[in-house]
Image: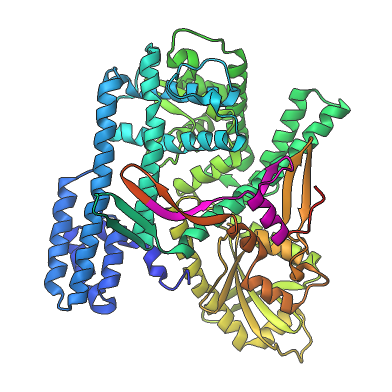
Amino acid sequence: MLLTNPERYNFYKYENELRKGIDSFTVYLDNVLKTDGIDAVLNVLKGSGLAVNIFNNSKRKRDFKQVIDHILEQLVKKTDLSKVESMKLEIEYIEYLFNQFLMEREEFFEEFEKIEDNYKVVSYLLSLEIYLSTLRKRGGINILKNIPLEDVTDFNTRQAFWDSAIESTGLILKYFKFKHYEFKGVKRNIGPKTLESSAYHIFYSEFWNTLNDLLEYWQYSEVSVKKDEKGKFHFNIQDENFELNNLISNERFNNLRQSWQMGKVGEYQQVLREKVLSPDEAYKKINNELSILFAFQYFGDPLLKKKVGSIKLSGWIRAYQLLVDECEKFLKKRKEVSVFNVDNYCFSKPINKWEKYFQQAGFTKEESKEIIKIFTFDHTSQDLIDCPFIRVDENLILIPSLTSKADISRALASNFLNRNLDLAFRGPEFEERMKVALQQCNLKNSSLFKRTDEDYECDIAFVLDDELYFVECKAHVQPFTTRQHANHLYKLFKETKQLNRIADFFEENIPIVIEQLKLNKSFKPKKVHRILLTTSMLGTPIFTNDVYIVDESSLLKFIGRNPPALHYFNKGKNVEIPSSKFEIYEGELSNTKFLKYLNSPPQIQITKDLFNKKELEFDLFNIERNIKTNETMHLGNKFSKAENELIKKHYSNLSF
């Protein structure tokens, strides 16, 4: 079960305990040992971040030794001592791999990146733009001769290269900050050979991402770490429920967005055929509609009037859209050049000119400063999609190939989440749209409220076949990384306690429910069910603390009687083929069908079959983990043997 040990995911608490000082942290661990045993202590050590010292920080090394020595003094059982020694050995293996990687990376760049440390940042930024530009255009300038991108013709492979390069931007820039490299040299010319070497930051960081992801799984779940007789390390992610939850959640979210995009591409093709708008006008219209649709998915405000900071959501979207438009115009005008510097090849303006630019676009001086602050990359940023501005000298730089393709709403949501900005307005909007959706499906519902010595408020209550449902709505931003998923799961677990407190009260006071739901006075529920509903996609069925946890997307599909669909884009049309393999979508909604859905949402069943456990081989280590081996979004209607088998399993036989 995924949430049998939810405290495993309570890492913010452990990090805060560690910040109080090593002596205070040791006292805290003593208390955990007395109440919960050695397994809980080791989980706290992992989750706090103290256990693995990837940058070989001497103080952290001393602190960890002090804590471990103290714990060992308290232990008597051989099994407990063995567990500590096993963890110490795992830490040794993990740190060795990180140190080897850092050493190899340092040696490579010392030998091949022939440029002063002060200009390594701008060299990387230029190489990133050239790399993305080559992927984007499939031609043009490609000075990265050792990286034959033109040979990669498969769409999914190119997209994976693109995504990996962008995801690594935050890690690389933070590494530069850690090394105290200067962000300077807007007009500094960089030679092709140096740029080619700098591009290897992208590939080294992909390897780092793999190691870092393994470390996060080790911190928050169960990972076996062993070393064979040849000195090669073997990792096995053993907590498959946690891993699959994360993978399936991300995949479902991406599929939803891609299905919207496919639909809009079909509309775009139709508009072009009708010749009502020019290609540029049609593209802008479709793109604007997608931005609004995505924004509603993230923020739950159809009118985009809610404020984040002092600016409305519509203002944030417009501000980012301005950057996208500027980058598109810049790329159209940019000529092939033989002199490579940031000023020529990236989009650059002095900070004061950016302030004037936003003011000329209708923002106030204060709003312009706020936009620039929130959009500029810093220690809180995930990557250059979240925060597209990089400060170099007194200029703010955009990577045009990256920013021009940005998913604006997702970038803003991630940015606001990482900065811990107030998004509390999302909750009430979520509740209201769920009430409307239930009402449209003939499920009469209402909020419940009662003030005694305490306030009791249930977001939604409804009756189906004489069984009573209490629903708590929680608006969460979609998690992506392993750490974010762990935090999300812990939030969900805590929120079941809140729901149970409220549901217990109303279950004990059914007359209040009858009155506020306007039910027959003789009503007695056959059974009572509790649902925690979240806006973010789940990757596994969850029933914990007597609460079903499901997501908005799958619930809306279920009550609307819309089964999962296969999507493919062929000859300018987006084709959807609904599944006929799930009886719970047939006929009218019933309590029996509802409970079957809650116990096993079909969207999760289907997506789970896209993944299989494989062993991945690298030079220094192997990993046993789940990887994606099939697709649900397809270009064209030619399917592999494995895809055809899945289609037959989950959909009707197709006529092609």
Where is residue 595? Give x, y as percent.
67, 76
Q: Which residues are magenta?
A: 623-650
Residue 254 versus residue 276 in the image, above or below:
below
Q: Is residue 630 magenta?
A: yes
Residue drawn where x is 29% and y is 17% of the image: 115
234 on left or right of 278: left
The quadrant in which residue 180 appears is top left
Residue 234 versus residue 365 in the image, above or below:
below
The quadrant in which residue 316 appears is top right
Towards the viewer: 426 or 655: 655
Residue drawn where x is 51% and y is 59% of the image: 244
Residue drawn where x is 37% and y is 15% of the image: 193
Residue 296 visible to an observer of this rendering? no
Where is residue 239? Give x, y as percent.
42, 64
Q: Is residue 146 magenta?
A: no
Towards the viewer: 591 or 570: 570
Residue 170 visible to an observer of this rendering? yes
Where is residue 561? Give x, y as percent.
78, 64
Residue 598 versus residue 318 in the image, above or below:
below
Residue 127 versus residue 31 in the image, above or below:
above
Towards the viewer: 443 or 458: 443
19 on left or right of 251: left
251 on left or right of 121: right
